[in-house]
Image: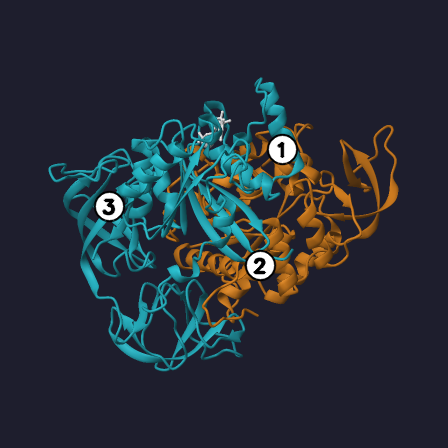
Chain colours: A cyan, B orange
Amino acid sequence: MSATNMDLLRFATAGSVDDGKSTLIGRLLLDSKAIFEDQLEAVEATSSAKGYDYTDLALLTDGLRSEREQGITIDVAYRYFATPNRKFIIADTPGHVQYTRNMVTGASTADLGLVLVDARQGLTEQSRRHAVILSLLRVPHLVLAVNKMDLVDFDQSIYENIYREFTQFATKLNVPDLEVIPISALQGDNVVTRSENMPWYSGPTLMHHLEHVHVASDRDLIDARFPVQYVIRPKSDEFHDYRGYAGQIAGGVLKPGDEVVVLPSGMTSRIAKIDLFDQEVPEAFPPMSVTVHLEDDVDVSRGDMIARVKNAPTPSQDIDAMICWMTTTPLQPRQKLAIKHTTRTGRALVKDVQYRLDVNTLHRDQGAGELGVNEIGRVTLRTTVPLLCDPYSKNRTTGSFVLIDEATGVTVGAGMING
Amino acid sequence: MTQTHSDYRLSQLDQLEAESIHIFREVAAEFEKPVLMFSGGKDSIVMMRLAEKAFYPAKIPFPVLQVDTGYDFPEVLATRDNWVDRLGVKLIVASVEQALADGIVIDDGKTSRNRHQIGTLLNAIEENGFTAAFGGGRRDEEKARAKERVYSHRDEFGQWDPKNQRPELWSLYNGRLHEGEHMRIFPISNWTELDIWDYIGREGIEIPSIYFSHQRRVFLRDGMLLSESEHNPLRDGEVAEERTVRFRTVGDLTLTGCVESTASTIPEIIEEVAVARVTERGATRGDDRFSEAAMEDRKKEGYF
Ligand SMILES: Nc1nc2c(ncn2[C@@H]2O[C@H](COP(=O)(O)OP(=O)(O)O)[C@@H](O)[C@H]2O)c(=O)[nH]1
Ligand SMILES: [Mg+2]
């Protein structure tokens, strides 16, 4: 088995405590043989030391000592497994409302969100919140796994009620693709192998869906965006005049000969060539890391953006964004913060908190005035440098930013630009 | 060479490479004094390759730091020197022996060389004023690492606080530091052991010969096959004999075990790794076995 031609799916999991998230991930890892004997033995030993009569697969994923002690998952943990055609990166995120920021973190890079519910409890406030967060972060594919079907006698009507209720709720969200799958994480029903206990279910198993969901078309291949990260100037005899702009393509396709504009200066030129290490490539697209050369000797540095002349973002210092606040001192008007957007760093002044979004009900509280930790709301910022941005709904890379507390250096907010 | 496809798909290995190169460039742009921690092992060799690609045709714009335990495999040091020569980077060697002699780290007679590396490393980082140190840690290696950020903040004492990590979103990395602090950077966080081998195979790059099957005089200790060596005196009841082996990780030779294997090419190694039943650390690293939380504890103190 070689990974050279495999593709990649990043997914984030969410569920309330005890819905079976850790058990499910443990099973995916075990059944795809990503778990090794020594890891399984350690978990079996711990399980029997705790007096369990089954192997607690959750122990495979609950990593930090304090988590094992408290028995809950408090931070995003990344897990890896692969099937012959796809590698998977799981961002395993905690479910509690006080860990919303961790879920936002895990969802930020995900192609797919996996929300667990306990079949006995049905949809809860938490499951709705998880779906809201995943849709706010524009995770394009959503799976609702109705877990613990073994504890409700694999009853079809229980599944169908949850299905109906959830699809109804999802119409209020941005969910381009939804799948609802009845499973038992503990026993393995519909996880990797089709359940004999639920002949009434004709949809895919969870693993089959993860392996086949189409993610290549989720990227924006129209609007070319190239944030310049680093200028490569070897200053060696062999490469005396070499001047390349290194970065990762954030959107669209760039080709030699393309007419481009450099922002914010507005200077125009053409792409002379695109290097990938010591090779020239005929085109570059997301998420390739390449080095772009321009025909003209224009002034380009880190923080600039190369885009198409007729399709470029408008530089803006007035930013309207949804912000998830991540620290205990609240976000308030007149606060000053550092902002990092693509490869640009500047400062931002909070002009206004327009509303706080209740992520359980989608209610907008216009009188809130501030955002507390783990709260999400719509905020207006004024930045010291123009941001070369797109709406987050169009491009998750050029539409996102982080806010940093200038005194502590800590990341305190995550922003998604409206438009 | 990377192929571009008409359907604009990038293989997972190319995606991982692109992500890692992005991280290298980000750090080079934002940190005053980065350094690459190079052990000579396969993970740090992949890091070297990625750094080479990130800045080509310019030289890698930071030095390479190796912590020399005094118990390193000679084959590993030879590979290190070849890489350093070929890329023309500056090599800084921080010696555990020297740190012990200078009293920077204290030998209580019970602690392994691996633990002495912590003090030696932190001292080298502080002495040179490094603000960012690239490490070859992967999240698939171990449970504590699974939660570690790509930019992992270290306080003035070089310590990691796992419960107080900065949120890390999208590919927006926050490199802010206070005086005396530094950042550990893990550009291959999302690679698995199999990815590393696939990449080494695809790139055709040099790795230490001890990763490939060879004849070696070995003996059994604590369930591990250790290499016979002057640094590794045999204890009562231990007998050395020649076996056909290879190493899955390289580290301190008094603690790093080998496995019996006839895999002598990268494809054979990949085949072996793909069906392996024991993690590379569990099989062959004495330092991780002392307790279930061994790695977490060492990381908090400032281990790689
Ligand atoms: N009967 C049954 N129990 C389950 C199932 N999935 C998880 N559990 C149990 O539910 C409890 C919580 O599971 P865990 O995976 O730790 O939940 P988490 O908090 O969401 O990570 C554990 O006792 C599991 O064994 C299932 O499908 N069926
Ligand atoms: Mg859990």
On the same chain, marks 2 and 1? The answer is: no
- The type of residue carrying mark 1 is Leu
- Amino acid type assigned to the residue bearing label 2 in the image: Met
The image quadrant that residue A394 belongs to is bottom left
Residue labelled 3 has its Cβ within 8 Å of some atom of ligand 1: no
Which mark identifies residue A40?
1
Outermost top residue: A51
Amino acid carrying mark 3 in the image: Lys
Which residue is depicted at the point 70% across and 39% down? B283
Q: Give SS at disc 2.
A: helix
Residue B124 located left or right of residue A365: right
Q: Is residue A152 above or below residue B145?
A: above
Q: Badge 3 is on which residue?
A: A172
State the image coordinates of residue A295 (x, y, percent, origin top left). 37, 82
Q: Specify whether residue B95 is in view.
A: yes
Image quarter where the C terminus of chain B lies is top right
Q: CA distance from mark 1 to mark 3?
A: 42 Å
What label sits on residue B48 in the rendered view? Answer: 2
Give the x, y percent position of residue A19: 42, 30
Q: Earlier in the sequence, mark 1 or mark 3?
A: 1
* Residue that protrudes farthest toward the front in the picture: A200
Q: Which mark is in front, 3 or 2? A: 3
In this rendered view, identify the residue nearer to me: A127 or B98.
Answer: A127
Residue at x 43%, y 62% (from the top left corner): A287
Q: Is residue A416 left or right of residue B7?
A: left
- What quarter of the picture does the N terminus of chain B occupy? bottom right
Front residue of this view, candidates B156 and B296: B296
Mark 1 nearby-residue class (10 Å; few <14, some 14–19, many ≥20): some
